[in-house]
Amino acid sequence: MQRKDDRSRVWTFVCYPESVREGWRDALDDLHIAWAESPLHDKDTNADGTVKKPHWHVLLVFDGKKSYEQVSEITDSIGATIPQRCASAKGLVRYMAHLDNPDKAQYSVSDIIGHGGLDVAEYLRPTSATRYEMIREMMDYIAANDIIEMEDLLLYAAHERYDDWFPLLCDSCAYVIGAMLKSRRHRADRQTVPEVRVVRVSDSGEILSDGVASASDETSSSASKPEQEGANGSS
């Protein structure tokens, strides 16, 4: 009977600050493998509400398959927990910030650190469904806050939605959002009625009135003059 291959390219384990070896990051860097560490999870709670011990989640991504024994040599050397095979590197990186677990404590994706060439942003790239949902959120925000300039939206995203809106604006959806902002500016221009200064002067040069009126008011006033003149001429 053929033996099951329990090796994997992707492994994960946990490090506790009080037990992990000092300089553990340098030790992993010295292996020249791609790996990632989570923010320090210091707000996680158990089912009974008690706070869990602070810890880091670590992801190792090898070029080739490694056995449990090979990876446990690494974890033993730095004082980490026993390693576990990881079914989805993307899923674990997202779990590092609890992105798909709103009931858990939330951590910033900007605090997820990649080492050895691991591109965290690539693992966090949203799916098509998630991307469309975020674009809809941006459109709702634009309409609710009367945004008409891309600069205003970019600044808001950079400071308030850096983990999701900002990379999406920078990488893929600026065109459609820009088209919406342009449409809103054109609509505002069409609805704006310019004001004009109206000065009425008598035949002797005396100023009868001086004020500001909208273009529509002036148009309606001009249109009524022939009627008034006609009425005066017939009397």
Image (cartoon, rainbow, N blue to C red):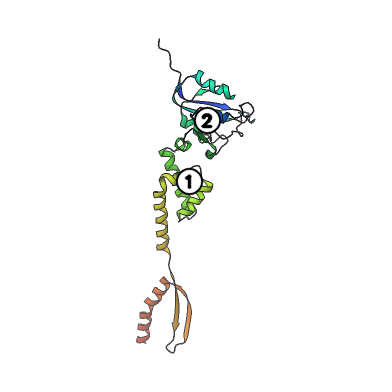
Q: Quadrant of the C terminus?
A: bottom left
Return the disc, 1 or 2, that comes first in the chain's sequence.
Answer: 2
Q: Residue at x 48, y 79 (%)?
A: 210
Label 2 sits on a secondary structure element that is helix
> Could one spot residue 80 in this view of the protein?
no
At horizontal 44% and vertical 82% (from top left) the residue drawn is: 200
Q: Looking at the picture, how far across and down is residue 221, in whole percent?
A: 40, 76
Query: In the drawing, does residue 89 fall left or right of residue 81?
Result: left
Residue shown at 58% from the left, 25% from the top = 78
Q: Nearer the viewer, residue 112 or 200?
A: 112
For disc 2, the neighbor class at 10 Å (few under 14, some 14 to 19, many from 20) is few
Using the numbered discs, state the Cα–Cα distance from disc 1 to disc 2 in whole angstroms.
30 Å
Question: Which is nearer the eye, 223 or 16?
Answer: 16
Residue 108 horizontal side relative to residue 201, left or right: right
Give the vertical position of 156 relative to 30 (above or below).
below
Q: Nearer the viewer, mark 1 or mark 2?
A: 2
Q: Residue at label 2?
A: 29
| Position in image of residue 207 (x %, y %) | 47, 84
Numbered tag placed on residue 166 in the rendering: 1
Q: Secondary structure at mark 1?
A: helix
Amino acid at dot 2: Asp
Find residue 116 and report its horizontal and vertical position in percent. Answer: 49, 32
Quarter residue 168 falls in? top left
| Amino acid, disc 1 | Phe
Q: Quadrant of the N terminus?
A: top left
